[in-house]
Image (cartoon, rainbow, N blue to C red):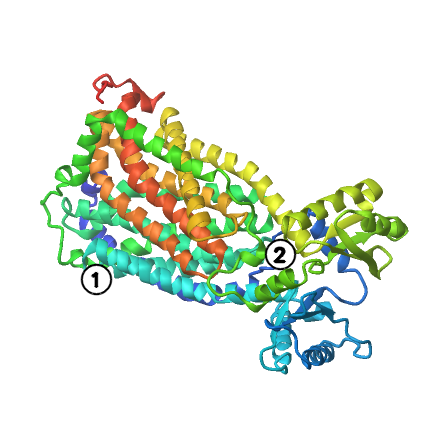
Amino acid sequence: MTSELLAPDHSGADPRPKRSRTKTVLPWLVLAVWIGLAVGSFSLAGRLDSVTRDNQADYLPASAQSTKVLQATAGLPGGEDGLLVVVYERAGGLQPGDREAAARGYTALAERFGIDTDAPPQIVDSDDGTALMFGLPLDREWVDDEAEAVSVADARDLLADRPDGLDAYVTGPSAIGADMDEVFDSVDAKLLLATAVVVAVLLILTYRSPLLWLVPLTAVGVAAVLSMGAVYVLTQVFDFTITSMSSALLIVLVFGAGTDYALLLVSRYREELHHHERPIDAMLAALRGAGPAILASAATVVAGLLCLLVADLNSTSGLGPVGAAGIGSALLVMLTFFPAMLVVLGRRVFWPFVPRLGAEAHAASSRWARLGEAIDRRRIVSWVVPLVVLGGLAFGLVGASGSLPQLDQFARATPDSVIGAKTIDERFPDQGGQPVRVMSRPDRRDEVLAAVRSTPGVASAEIRRASDDWVEISAIPVDSPESARETATIKRLRTHLDEVAGEDALVGGPSAELLDTDETNTSDRNLVMPLVLLVVLVILGLLLRAIVAPLVLVATVVVSFFGALGLCNLLFDHVLGFAGWESSVPLIGFLFLVALGVDYNIFLMTRVREEAARHGTVEGTKRGLAVTGGVITSAGVVLAATFAVLATLPLVMLIQMGILVAVGVLIDTLLVRSIVVPALTMSLGSRIWWPSKLSRASEDCVDDAV
């Protein structure tokens, strides 16, 4: 308490009782305000699903050719914006009556979707006599928004009339999209429940208290609701894309970061309770001590997330404000609502390990103090060996697979659309091509059509619909969808048409959309990754008032990321058998690992700097590690566990994201933050603070201990 507050009032009244009453009432006022905010946010959070978009077209930037094709298609008369492909298969060979069943199925579907039933169905036989296939173009009314899922479900129901032993699968772009949406629809509820359970278990193990774990869990729950409501409001004000992936990551990010902030604040609060009689005084001291580091770490993560706004891919750029809203919500709740709950509950919330006034914590004799002494004795070895190991793990990226095909996005249960697509690929090796949509200006239609037909890899092409502005040409590639040869055909087609008609011809369609997504992800990585590193460097420099320390800390985070990436590549390729990396995972994983890894740098190094100012850099590092090592490790384990929950979901993209971030956080927490950074700091001594005044401390000399 400052001298001004202790000085007597000249009116003769003692201000301390009034100040005391204000402090007593303040936590209750904060709780009352938050109850109102939580109720208001709950109604808004329930609307978040209504603004979530997961169509491939929603991911693409406006500059992509496939996006321009979609815009051009919207002006065409009629429909046929969707496509269902039906394949019948009998493993032992088709029997009499199977073709009649396929014809009945075609008629039923045509009647359901308003297609002319007078024309005979174009049913194709496989060369080996085991399968039949036909395609059914759908008007846009059947595939717009939620109608797509209903259309696919109805189609599958209508094909139930068939002989025993004859399998029928509905596939094609519309069916695959509907199956993907169905998986995403079940993600948020499962993820929220699983994350809450994991965090609760870890908090119980950390605090070993029957009551204390409920306080941070309640707070992060409030933060999650607040963040979802805030994101919904932002979507109404700003035009950005929110996908089911970003919605899932929002939940994990809020629970992980919020719990980390809670652990750090509780650790400092417990420390201050040994020095202050009243919980409110201890909490104010804890907020003064831990608050700046928590605020700085949150600001770093928010700044890193907002770097995603420069990305061209809509789904990636949209994750920036979504994640920033999540971190902002977690920060606000953990610095107001959470402290108020702790103060109201008092010391008893820590039972049975209640911190007593005057009793000192024994951090100096803890295992972290012993680790600091061991690192001091072997400084060079302590940072060289781990960095060599991480460098070796990074070589696991050699020979990494390409982008994950859409058909391999599903984990655990394989939907009918994927089984059907793979059946077509196997039974119809020369007829399984997915239509590529070519748009031509009307006055160039003949030469564009000729150019399409003459492009190697195109089996056939024909004019479909036309308007005053555009003519649609449907081209069928020879090769199966998403294969390397089909991708090469699309690239050849674009190059050929650019030479023939320039901007008067565009190439789109489902496969072209996936190609544009992958290429945009690559360019976004090249742009966003350096920008994130630059932003993090600047923030660390301002916080630590140094140049050397930020460079060292960011370098360790980068090495940690590539080590985790290499290790995960080996795991995904040789253990889990994934067909490749989902193209957005490395960039988003990099952002989370760099930003969250810097979080732990901030928590450690701000305390080290505080101690170094009094005891010198080497001794300050040991003291900082002794005080923060336990809580940083607990925070890292909690964060890794929350991201690992993503690995329980049925989508490879989320599994890869969860495992990559979890592995990276554990490497960063248990190895880099606990050993490498302290060892490098001790090796460099006061020079790590260059060019601040602290770097000129003469009492801390760097010796050659090995």
The residue under label 2 is which amino acid type? Gln
Residue drawn at point x = 30 percent, y = 38 percent: 671
Residue 190 position, x and y percent, is 42, 65
Residue 175 position, x and y percent, is 62, 67
The residue under label 1 is which amino acid type? Leu
> Which residue occupies the foreground of this view, 464 or 269?
464
User: Farthest left residue?
Assistant: 358
The quadrant the C terminus occupies is: top left
Residue drawn at point x = 55 percent, y = 61 percent: 52
Residue drawn at point x = 38 percent, y = 38 percent: 598
Examine the rendering and report whether any part of residue 11 can be seen. yes
Quickly name the residue at label 2: 56
Quickly name the residue at label 1: 211
For residue 1, what is the image quadrant? top left
Q: Secondary structure at mark 2?
A: helix
**What's the distance in space between the residues labelled 1 and 2, CA to CA?**
46 Å
Examine the rendering and report whether any part of residue 36 can be seen. no
Residue 164 badge: none
- Give neighbour class at mark 2: few <14, some 14-19, many 20+ (Cα, 10 Å): some
